[in-house]
Amino acid sequence: VNEQCDINGLICLNTHYAELSVLKRKESKRPGLECLCVPSCIEPEINIITVESFKTNENESIIQLMMDRLPAERLKRNVVRGRLDVLVSLGGSVALFVGASILSFLEIIYYFIIRMRNVNIPKLKRSKTSKCEFKIK
């Protein structure tokens, strides 16, 4: 559907901004658009069940709250250590107790690979018969 708002539609959107800008659960009685989403962990959701008001002769207010359901604590799981953190911690422990780091082990492996490579490849010898001659005039 490709509909465009005219000036009357924009005025209508502006007057109903409060209802259109808030998402609510189906059970909620507050104004807003219905959504099948999980409730927010930050915003409290309060449903008014009954409202009673009466006047007293004194300067005081009386508020009576009735809860639809008990509040629940929502937990969020945060990963404390990832794979890289474990590798860094392990490397730090090895460096502290052994005196070597991962780079030291890589240097040892590299040294033996280069050493074995140099042993297996025979050195090219220059022939003694080649001579370079320069003539000066």
Image: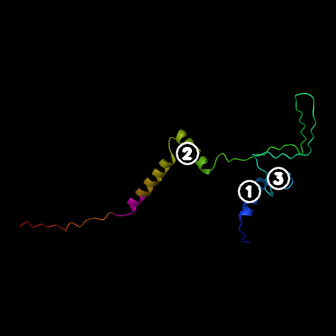
Q: Amino acid at mark 1?
A: Asn
Please name the residue that numbered disc 3 is placed on.
31
Residue range of the region highlighted in magenta in the rendering = 115-122
What is the tally of numbered marks visible in this picture?
3
Quadrant location of residue 121? bottom left
Above or below, 54 relative to 91: above
Identify the mark nearer the N-term, 3 or 1: 1
Badge 1: residue crowd in 10 Å (few <14, some 14–19, many ≥20): few
Q: Secondary structure at mark 2?
A: helix
Residue 40, position in %: x, y?
A: 76, 49
- Mark 1, residue position: 14
At x 55%, y 42%, the residue is: 92
Q: Which residue is mark 2?
A: 91
Instruction: Estimate the spatial distance between the alpha carbons at disc 1 and disc 2, rounded to whole Å.
Output: 60 Å
Amino acid type of the residue that numbered disc 3 sits on in the rendered structure: Pro
Task: Give the residue drawn at x 30%, y 65%.
Answer: 124
**In the image, residue 125 lies at what x, y percent?**
28, 64
Q: Nearer the viewer, residue 19 or 114?
A: 19
SS label for mark 1: helix
Q: Is residue 44 left or right of residue 117?
A: right
Of residue 126 and residue 56, the one placed in the foreground of this image is 56
